[in-house]
Amino acid sequence: YYVYRGLVVEVAYPQESDFLKAAPRFSKNWPLEADQYRNRIVLFEQGQWVRQLEEAVAENEKADASEAVRLAGVELTEDLCVLRNALLTDDTIGIRSRGRALAGDAAGLVFLLNRRYVTTTSWFWKQVFECPWKPKDFEELVKKSASFTPASPEEIVTAAEQLYAEIMEMAGSRGVSIESDELIV
């Protein structure tokens, strides 16, 4: 790595690059990771590295998203369970913090289901609200779940439960289930 005009630049060789190896992978974090493989300023190239990166990105474009969606759904389910536990123990901070986590994970799942990625983190919410396929009243439910708008703990939980149900229905309509055929002990 070296710094050029304030930018950290990786000088990589194809056979040694973990970056190239990761480019074709499709994970639940894909919406936040995909842009780094697609948008770049090439200052120096050796060994046709950019061509190899383009090939990895093309492979990624064709990758099956089912497992990433399933894992994101599992994480969303955990968020909901922790949120409900916070409600049972009257933990207002827990409700608000888990409501925000659930809203963020729900947004990630909407990105996955739309196969869209975040081009800059400052536009995360703007871009997810613009996705064509999302739950009814998605923006309102996210804003309540995340406490971006005033909401009581009960309203947060209600919005989060509705958001969860609608997103899981969307995933199910694509044939993706959070349940695995493999027994995990």
Image (cartoon, rainbow, N blue to C red):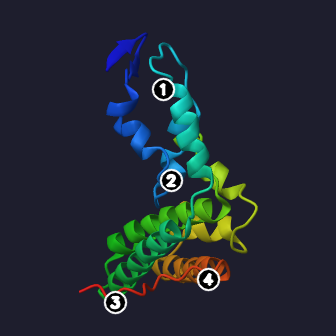
Is any atom of residue 82 visible in this view? Answer: yes
Which kind of residue does numbered mark 3 sit on?
Answer: Leu
| 47 vs 147: above or below | above
Q: Secondary structure at mark 1?
A: helix
Q: Where on the picture, by quarter, is residue 74?
A: bottom left
The residue depicted at 44 percent of the width and 71 percent of the height is 71
Residue 147 visible here: no
User: Relative to residue 77, is residue 71 depicted above or below?
Assistant: above
Mark 1 or 4: in front is: 1
Residue found farthest to the left: 185
Residue position marked by numbered label 3 in the rendering: 88
Between marks 1 and 4, how big is the CA–CA gap?
39 Å
The residue under the point 37% across, 25% down is: 13
Query: What residue sits right under mark 1 in the picture?
Result: 49
The three-letter amino acid code for the residue at tag 4 is Gly
Q: Which mark is residue 172?
A: 4
Q: Which residue is mark 2?
A: 30
Judged from this view, the residue extending furthest toward the top is 5
Q: Which residue is rendered at x = 71% and y = 58% of the image?
A: 131
> Which element is circle 3 on?
helix
* Local crowd size for mark 1, using a 10 Å CA cut-off: few (<14), some (14–19), many (≥20): some
Q: Tell me the amino acid under the disc marked 2.
A: Trp
> Local crowd at mark 2 within 10 Å, few (<14), some, or many (≥20)?
many
Cβ atoms under marks 2 and 3 closer than 8 Å: no
Spatial separation of the CA atoms under disc 3 and disc 4:
28 Å
Q: Closer to the camera: disc 2 or disc 3?
A: 2
Residue at x 45% of width, y 86% of height: 179
Identify which amino acid the numbered label 1 is placed on: Trp
Disc nearest the viewer among 3 and 4: 4
